[in-house]
Amino acid sequence: MKKQLPLLLFLSFFMLTGCEDFLECTSNRRPQIHDANFKDGRIGVYYYQEVTTEIKNEPRDNDYGYNYDIYGNLPDGVQMFANYRTVSFEGTPEVAGTFTFTLMLYVDPPLNYDYDSGEYENVMCSESTSKEFTITVY
């Protein structure tokens, strides 16, 4: 019975979730924001930091549309700029403090036409992700 337990769990998973959802996500294609250690800023001194993004497990990630949002506060004088798969934070900080914000990434996957079904299919496991960052200004 112990040897059959993994097989029973696997089959139960398919019965509860359905094969289609599981198989669509086996490639684990999802947006990813890379880690970045934000350096400290100084009031009145130009600040620049980059964060890069990609589609995990997707060699054609240049075919996707990338959209970004910020939730939280950037230091006054620092702005976010998106250049496709790279996001930069730049400007001259005007106030001291610790500023924590969340970078949201939303992707628009290319639509693949399935000739058998006559429909467009989305091969993504997820179309968004987020990561929290902090900038400290002295």
Image (cartoon, helix red, strand yellow):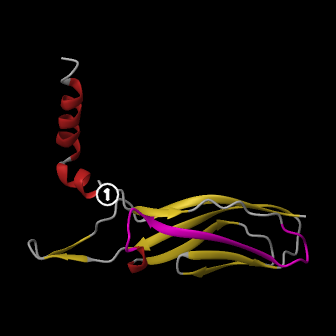
Image position of 83 with respect to 123: above or below? below
Look at 47% across and 70% down and name the residue there: 106
Classify the position of the C terminus by image quarter: bottom right
Q: Which residue is mark 1?
A: 27
Tag count: 1
Specify the quadrant of the image occupied by residue 48. Answer: bottom right
Please provide the residue range marked out in magenta.
Answer: 41-60
Q: Amino acid at mark 1?
A: Ser
Specify the quadrant of the image occupied by residue 61. Answer: bottom left
Look at 89% across and 66% down and name the residue there: 96
Classify the position of the N terminus by image quarter: top left
Judge from the rendering whether residue 135 lies leftward or rightward of residue 82; answer left or right: right
User: Residue farthest to the top?
Assistant: 1
Where is residue 73? Give x, y as percent: 72, 67
Image position of 8 with respect to 13: above or below? above
Where is residue 134? Give x, y as percent: 73, 59
Nearer to me, 137 or 73: 137
